[in-house]
Amino acid sequence: MWKGFSHLLKKDVKMMLSGKFFLLALLSLILYSCYINFIYVNVDQENCRVYLYDPNNLCSAQSKYINRAHSRQELKTACSDRFSIGIDFSADPPEIYMLSSGAEKTDRYRAMWGEAVLTELTEEKPEIVGSYVKEERSRREITAEFLFFELSAVGFLGLASVLFKEKQMGVIRVHGILPVSKAAFILSKLCVFLWSDLIFTCLLTWINVGISDSLTILPAVLTQAGILSLIMSLTGFLCAVLLSDFKQFSLFYLILAVFASTPVFLAGQTGVSWKWLAWHPMHHLFTAMKSAYFGKTAASFPYYLVCIAAIAILFYGACHILAREAAKEG
Amino acid sequence: MVLVDYDCCRCRNIHSVQSKVSELVEQTAAGKAKQQTWEMGGRGMITVKNLTFSYGKGKQALHGLDFTVNDGEIFGFLGPNGSGKSTTQKILTGILTGHGGFVSLFGQEMVSSRTHDFFQKIGVLFEFPYLYANLSAIDNLKYFASFYPKQQARDVFELLDQLEFKKDFLKKPVSSYSKGMRQRVSMARALISNPRLLFLDEPTSGLDPSGAVLFRKIIQEERKKGTTVFLTTHNMVDADLLCDRVAFLSNGTIAALDTPKRLKEKNSSHQIVIHYLYHGKRRERQVDALELEKGLSFPHEEIISVHSQEPTLEDMFIQYTGRGLS
């Protein structure tokens, strides 16, 4: 069995090479890293600007974060970006003027920041969020998000594309009469993609979080990456075998991307919260991935139990439909 | 019963016609002896009893097949599209499960025989050449051979050479091959493990006439080595030339099973047609076989041709299956 398995592995690596999968992964790595290092960490780092309109000079606060507005209109214009915070001392009592960002949680933080600036309760490093410097937090956050996207969308597509090729060439049928088990056929593919995803995870984390910081979080991150990789690869496997042509597959991919991953990303990025997200399996995988990047053990025992059960069910399903595919007409 | 089995010959007189007839009588006797060996039943390589299979409610594909394929025999499985040929082959190769009735291969019942050992003993040529298009012929064959014990696998180069594969293409990817070349590599894949039982589905499809002749020669060589061949085909020439016995499958049942020769004999009109010249004019005479045995004499100047009226295997196919070849 293992002799045959090594040949299956070798063949799958060849298939991935010929499909330019590694090149695609390398390009993704470069693209994500460039974006994180040259764009993301340089934007969105600014604290919310605080504008003060105080025609009667009632406010004694002298914080460096305060910008003076000379009229109520100027205050309103400055706050129209839905990011800045306005404090109007012309009113009695003084008012906080703010246009909503769309996320209740973010608005609360903005108001808190405005008050902190006004009462000069800002610390020397206002950018410290939790136990992380803001840049560090941003790096971890966006790396987790990119990794989740890469594994869920691109990983799914990777295995499916290899299998689709094999399906079109008809060689799956040949494997039905070879002295090698169907489980080995699936396992070899999973192994190749799992290793590829784990290497990608290590590189992405090292480059964007830093080697020393990565060391502490990598075990947890790799665990989550492994779970996500296996689930998505097996889902890709099932879809590639079940769907008859690439057109159908592309449509399904689009549906998966739009309806399965987008709400999770939206919730993660914008702070929008939907109650039904608690029933969205991808949301839990995403949260677990993010938690792993922040060194938290948010994932519980039932989470791992459900993940293992999902992998086992998907694997069983893959074996079953592979046997069905082998028996199909030419 | 005597049948004349040659066409387009030019005979100068009736005596030569009768001597040819005697030769054919001898050949038929030899054929009968060979057939008797199969009928006596050698060792059963495949035994099928009351085989049934359904793809779902109201989709019964096989309605109780009974046949035996002997060790070292070339067994032809013929039938129109949708008659159940592929289903039977899939059951026999272990791809399709859930059949009814009894099926045994290599003396073991099918239910328990789908082991690695079973797959090591069979070779399957599919109707279409299923190969890795991005790999070369050599890489394909080395990959497929790697699943068999080393001592069992045949030499890739030797095999491709036997199949007269163009050497220039050995290292080129399969995607650049013609259909005939792909078929040769597929045949090599089926033979690479030196199988004891070979399943061939339309082996000469996509080949030019010389390729078809070569494939037939290779199949016969395999039989000489003791390999049992289960041949599924629409090609009646292949079936006639290669098969020791053929089974006609129609709507999931076996309509007829015998040697090609016997099947044709059974349905022969037992007549020959002689074209000859008399008074400078071309004439035709239909003669009954019984008349020939008594000795045939008729006025003529020159015999142009003697045609047996024996039906072809294709005629038999249509007769038993009720459908023409598509």
Image (spheres, coloured by chain):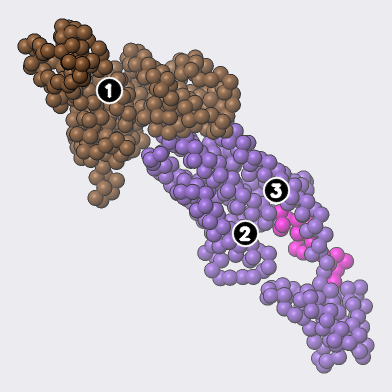
Residue for point 81% across, 54% down? A38
Amino acid type at circle 1 is Asp
Disc 1 secondary structure class: helix
Q: Nearer the viewer, residue A315 or A26?
A: A26
Which image quarter: residue B231?
Answer: top left
Quarter of the image containing the C terminus of chain A?
top left
Q: Which residue is mark 2?
A: A287
Image mark 2: chain: A
Apparent side of residue A193 relative to residue B297 in the rendered image (left or right): right
Stretch in magenta: A122-143
Q: Nearer the viewer, residue B27 or A114?
A: B27
Image mark 1: chain: B
Which chain did the renderer colour purple? A
Identify the mark at residue A28; answer none if there is no mark: 3
Q: Which residue is mark 1?
A: B240
**CA separation, marks 3 and 1?**
60 Å
Measured as percent of width and height from the top left, residue B48 is found at: 22, 30
| N-terminal label among 2 and 3 | 3
Q: Is residue A189 magenta?
A: no
In the image, which is nearer the foreground, mark 2 or mark 3?
3
Which chain did the renderer colour brown? B
Measured as percent of width and height from the top left, residue A44 is found at: 79, 64
Amino acid type at circle 2 is Thr
**CA separation, marks 2 and 3?**
22 Å
